[in-house]
Image (cartoon, helix red, strand yellow):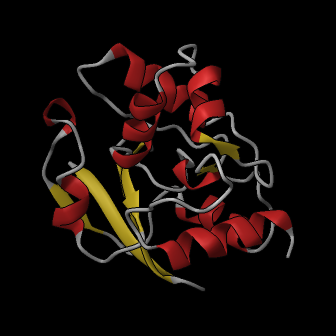
């Protein structure tokens, strides 16, 4: 059984789905649990139930209050058939707040400098927004690019992390 909760944030609702062990399986700026669960690989799917709070709500609240590293230690369970994407998600977790990188730089950090499209796909398919910080990856020209939860959310997160 997976637990989920939804909390209010300055940019709207944020829902997180966690395993019994407290690992994030899905997260995003939405109230739509079905939408989140559609991002989770089938091997990690389980029934979900609503709870008042999950074990990761406190780190999220601390992050929103300005402790930008509070979410770093939260475990994440992500799965995909491709080794590059699994590796890219691990690398993405190492991108520091306030230090966004471009898709090209992210591809290089992931060990495949020419795989810019694959790096972008890792961002687009990321089921654990915020914890696996795809919002910290930008277009080569420095513009925002896309974000599943809206460019306004991505922009707010980047401003929050830069201290603006």
Count how many numbered circles sit on residues in the image.
Answer: 0
Query: Is 85 drawn above or below residue 134 in the view shown?
Result: above
x and y percent of residue 92 in the render? 58, 35
Q: Can residue 64 be seen in this view?
A: yes
Q: Furthest-right residue in view?
A: 163
Determine the residue positioned at 76% across, 52% down: 97
**Quadrant of the rendered image containing residue 45:** top left
Q: Is residue 21 visible?
A: no
Q: Is residue 76 left or right of residue 91?
A: left
User: Looking at the image, which is closer to me, 58 or 81?
Assistant: 81
**Quadrant of the rendered image containing residue 125:** top left
**Quadrant of the rendered image containing residue 32:** bottom left
Determine the residue positioned at 20% across, 48% down: 1
Query: Is 11 drawn above or below residue 91 in the view shown?
Result: below
x and y percent of residue 60 in the render? 61, 64
Determine the residue positioned at 15% across, 44% down: 46
Q: In this view, does 78 lie to the left or right of 153?
A: left
Q: In this view, does 63 lie to the left or right of 123?
A: right
x and y percent of residue 102 in the render? 64, 42
x and y percent of residue 159 in the render? 75, 72
Query: Is 33 drawn above or below residue 102 in the view shown?
Result: below
Q: Is residue 66 left or right of residue 53?
A: right
Q: Furthest-front residue in view?
A: 141
Determine the residue positioned at 29% across, 18% down: 82
Q: Quadrant of the C terminus?
A: bottom right
């Amino acid at each position: 059984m997976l637990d989920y909760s939804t909390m209010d944030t300055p940019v709207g609702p944020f829902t997180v789905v966690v395993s019994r062990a407290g690992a994030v399986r899905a997260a995003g700026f939405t109230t739509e649990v079905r939408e989140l669960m559609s991002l989770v690989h089938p091997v990690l799917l389980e029934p979900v139930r609503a709870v008042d709070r999950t074990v990761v709500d406190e780190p999220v609240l601390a992050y929103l209050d300005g402790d930008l590293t509070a979410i770093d230690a939260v475990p994440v369970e992500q799965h995909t058939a491709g080794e590059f994407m699994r590796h890219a998600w691990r690398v993405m977790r190492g991108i520091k707040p306030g230090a966004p990188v471009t898709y090209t730089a992210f591809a290089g950090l992931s060990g495949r400098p020419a795989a810019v499209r694959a790096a972008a796909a890792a961002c687009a398919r990321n089921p654990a927004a915020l914890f696996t910080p795809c919002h910290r990856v930008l277009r080569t020209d420095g513009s925002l690019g896309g974000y599943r939860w809206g460019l306004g959310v991505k922009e707010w997160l980047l401003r929050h992390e830069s201290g603006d």
